[in-house]
Amino acid sequence: MAQVQITQIKSIIDRPERQKATMKALGLGKINKTVIKEFTPQIAGMVNHVQHLVAVKEV
C-alpha cells in the first residue's frame, strides 16, 4: 500500500475529545510533528475526521 506523511498543523486545544483521541491514535499531539503511515481505509477515515488539523502528503 501507499504511504502518507501526516503532519499536525493546528493545535488540538479547544477541540472535541473525539478529535483529540483521533490525533493521539494517529501518533500526533504537537504542532509540526510528522508521522508516516500506511494509507489504509482506517487511516483515511481518521485523516478525514481531522483534516482541518493536519496536512497529508504522499511519500
Image (spheres, rainbow, N blue to C red):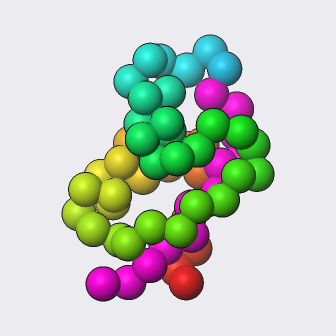
Position of residue 53 measured from the top left corner of the image (x, y, whole percent)? 60, 43
Position of residue 27 measured from the top left corner of the image (x, y, whole percent)? 52, 47
Q: Quadrant of the C terminus?
A: bottom right
Q: Is residue 19 visible?
A: no
Residue 3 falls in image quadrant: bottom left
Position of residue 24 measured from the top left corner of the image (x, y, whole percent)? 49, 36
Q: Is residue 34 above or below residue 38?
A: above
Q: Quadrant of the N terminus?
A: bottom left
Q: Is residue 49 visible?
A: yes
Q: Tell me: 11 left or right of 16.
A: right
Question: What residue span does the magenta drawing correspond to?
Answer: 1-12
> Residue at (70%, 52%) from the top-left corner?
33
Residue 11 falls in image quadrant: top right
Identity of the residue furthest to the right in this view: 32
> Residue at (71%, 39%) from the top-left corner?
30
Position of residue 29 measured from the top left corner of the image (x, y, whole percent)? 63, 37
Q: Tell me: 23 left or right of 8.
A: left
On whether residue 53 falls in the magenta region, the answer is no
> Residue at (59%, 51%) from the top-left corner?
54
On whether residue 9 falls in the magenta region, the answer is yes
Given residues 51 and 6, the one toward you in this image is 6
* Circle count: 0
Q: Is residue 47 above or below residue 38?
A: above
> Residue at (25%, 56%) from the top-left corner?
42
Q: Is residue 54 above or below residue 10?
A: below
Q: Tell me: 13 left or right of 40.
A: right
Given residues 28 and 15, the one toward you in this image is 28
